[in-house]
Amino acid sequence: MAGYRDLLRTPGVGRMIAAQLLARFPNGMMSLAILLHVEQRTGSYAQAGLVLAAASVGQAVAGPVTSRWMGAWGMRRVLTLTLTVCVLSVLGLALLPLSLAGYMVLGLVAGLSTPPVQAAVRTIYPKLVNASQLTPLFSLDASLQEIIWILAPVLITFVSTQVGTMPGLLLVAIILVVGGGWFILSPEVGRVRIPRSRRAFGRVVLKPPVLLATVLGFLLIGACSAVEVGVVSTFGHGGLEAGLVLAVFSIGSLAGGLGLGHIPMGPWAMARRLAIVAVGLSLTMVALDVWWLGGTLLLAGIGIAPALAVLFAITTASVKFSETAEAFGWAGTGQLIGAAAGSAVAGFLIDHGGPAGAYLAAALFAIVGVIVSVVFVRFFPDLRHRDPSPHPDTEPVNVQTS
């Protein structure tokens, strides 16, 4: 823990971590807020699901695009533009009397305009710390983001069910403004300038490590989403046990990230960390009582934040600085698609075989992740003896000799 204390004493690091956590906090609230609000207004979960799907599609499409814009127009301009449009869209969802088509359009716009805070902050990190601190910083970041997924759903569910769904969406808008404003006005965001990328849009995702980060993010988050659906199906929407079990899952991830964050990352790091997740998720199917699920998901969680840290590190270590934001945008899109796929597959298997089907889906997602990590291990950069900083943007210089 002493290493993390030293890390947080580095100028700007603590502020950046706190600001980006608050700026991204609405990410853990938006889906539930929209779902509950539209269902209350329309009386249909199916219609609410369509609006939520539109928002998710918007987020998936926008990730690489808005992230790349930051290199062309500057981080503050893009973040301010997207934040403004996103807040107005959320306010429209909350306050306007809309048809299903209207809700879907505003949901799509809200998704398209989600501020690319994650790509921005992970582009800034290599400029804040020295090379030896970057791997622990990625691990700390991956661990602390679990705070979002522990607290945000609980907060928005409480406000939306006890106060009202309109106040719930208004709360999302307020946190977007406060958190996004703090992040945008942070000095580090103004100091770091992303060079304009010289490569065609989408080329960066064809680099093997970036493609691996995108695919493995899809599989890892797909497994997590399947677990969430399975836990809710096992204990019911109103069951206290569901919240406690999911909290234990996130606590395991937080503990794993903090405990393993100092370990150097070799080519086999991803396979080992995903193996922990796969073993824990495979054991869930033995029994579906709260104690067994809590214990097995605690084990599985230990590998999640460390695996995410590897994804962040191999991405930055494999691209030029001008490409980092777009690369993280593609990785984020993979994770969003994984979340949708994991939920869909788990829901299908639950309908045909009960809650155990969701845990089977989660385990299969994780096992495929281990297989991919083993088969393509030669494409993982060895970061045990080098730092994961992005490559500098350099150009050849013509030297005249007489």
Image (tube, rainbow, N blue to C red):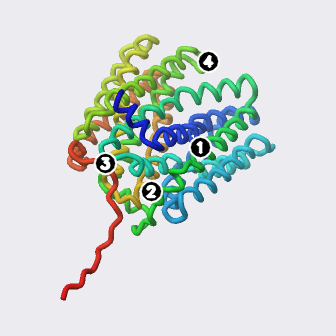
What's under tag 3, amino acid-wise?
Pro
Q: What's the CA distance linking mark 3 and mark 1? A: 35 Å
Q: CA distance from mark 4 to mark 2?
A: 40 Å
Left or right placement of residue 203 versus residue 55 in this view: left
Per the image, the residue denoted by label 1 is 53
Q: Is residue 40 left or right of residue 3?
A: right
For marks 2 and 1 on the same chain, the one whose residue lies earlier in the sequence: 1
Q: Which residue lies under the disc numbered 2?
A: 326
Q: Could you give the CA–CA distance between mark 2 and mark 1, rounded to whole angstroms? A: 23 Å
Is 233 situated left or right of 288 in this image? Answer: right
Residue type at mark 4? Answer: Gly
The N terminus is located in which quarter? top left
Of the image marks 3 and 4, the number of the one nearer the N terminus: 4
Indicate the secondary structure of the residue bearing disc 4. loop
Between tags 2 and 1, which lies in front?
2
Say which residue appears at 30% left-offset and 24% top-offset: 279
Q: Are marks 4 and 2 in contact (CB under 8 Å)?
A: no
Picture disc at residue 238: 4
Q: Are marks 3 and 4 in contact (CB under 8 Å)?
A: no
Q: Quadrant of residue 276?
A: top left
Amino acid type of the residue tagged 1 in the rendering: Ala
Out of 137 and 310, give the one closest to the viewer.
137
> How many neighbours does mark 2 have within 10 angstroms: few (below 14), some (14-19), or many (20 or more)?
many
The residue carrying pointer 4 sits among few (fewer than 14), some (14 to 19) or many (20 or more) residues within 10 Å by Cα, namely few
Q: Which residue is mark 3?
A: 388
Q: Which x, y percent locates residue 167?
A: 75, 33
Q: Of label 1 and label 4, which has the lower sequence position? A: 1
Sequence order check, earlier mark of 3 and 1: 1
Query: Residue 149: horizontal and vertical position, in percent?
Result: 52, 30
Along the line of sight, the residue nearer the viewer: 183 or 171: 183
